[in-house]
Image (cartoon, rainbow, N blue to C red):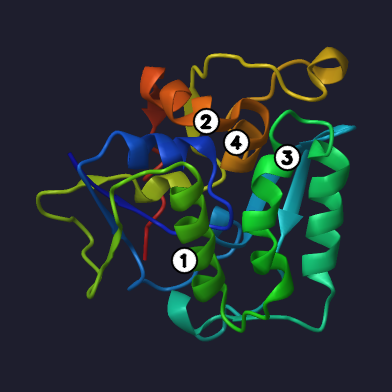
Amino acid sequence: MTSLIYPTYFPNMAHFWAVINSDAIHLEVSDNYQKQSYRNRTEIYGANGKLALTVPVSYTQKNRQLYKDVKIANEEQWQLLHLKSLQSAYSMSPFFEFYIDDLMPLFEERFDYILDLNLRCLDVLIDSLQIQTKPINTTAFEKEPIDKTDFRYLVKRNSEVKPFESYTQVFTEKHGFIPNLSILDLLFNEGPNAELYLTRQTLQIENPNKVKLK
């Protein structure tokens, strides 16, 4: 299967399920940016339940902007805040110390564009999961892609993905199992078993594609 997905900020497990189960991955980098999506947002499991981490961007809907042209609002100390949130949420997880050093450059290096950050996140995560498939960036936007399974709708926060098999999360005893969080949740809790976990999943994904992609 050849799949088409958006590069997002620390992608959720549904995105990586598509990556793991594909022979080839194409990344949609040729579209217009849209707000209220996972392009600049990820969700982790904090002490009080699901916690959203959002990268601030400089964007206005008055004039359409290409995804690749949207800048990060680096006036805010978002990298420090996100790192502290991850440390608070996962420092007691079994594999946090094993992976955090590989992730640290993402919180120390300055990124000017959200797409550049997301592409780097994906590269680091693919290496951490030891996935052999290397993504290919698109060169033009296709509303109806040919010879590709279109998973671009997973970028929408109202996409419903079920069922995910439960695994032990740091705060499971407090709030129960929370599915389809950032791949970081799976990585910190399951470590090298993360890839096997994803290959075991048989997901039902509801496509909310009534909303235009572009």
Q: Nearer the viewer, residue 164 or 37?
A: 164
Q: Say which residue appears at 41% left-offset and 43% top-offset.
A: 130
**Residue indicated by mark 2:** 192
Residues under labels 1 and 3: Cα distance? 22 Å
Q: Is residue 87 above or below residue 65?
A: above
**What type is the residue that disc 2 sits on?**
Pro
Please report whichever mark, 2 or 3, sits nearer to the chain's N-terminal start: 3
Determine which residue is flagged by label 4.
187
Q: Where does residue 160 sit, x and y in percent of width and height?
A: 50, 31
Secondary structure beneath label 2: helix
Quarter placement of the C terminus: bottom left
In the image, what residue type sits under mark 3? Phe
Q: SS for tag 3? A: helix
Residue kind at label 4, given as amino acid type: Leu
CA separation in Å, label 4 and label 2: 8 Å
Q: Earlier in the sequence, mark 1 or mark 2?
A: 1
The part of the image, by quadrant, that contains residue 21 is: top left
Q: Residues within 10 Å of mark 2 (few under 14, many from 20)?
A: some
Q: Secondary structure at mark 4?
A: helix
Which is more foreground, mark 1 or mark 3?
3
Front of the two marks 4 and 2: 2
How many residues crowd around disc 1 within 10 Å: few (fewer than 14), some, or many (20 or more)?
many
At label 4, counting other C-alpha atoms closer than 10 Å, the crowd grade (few under 14, some 14-19, many 20 or more) is many
C-alpha distance separating marks 1 and 2 = 22 Å
Q: Mark 2 touching mark 3, by CB under 8 A?
A: no
Q: Earlier in the sequence, mark 4 or mark 3?
A: 3
Q: Which residue matches tag 3?
A: 96
Query: Disc 1 to disc 4, how far (Cα)?
Result: 18 Å
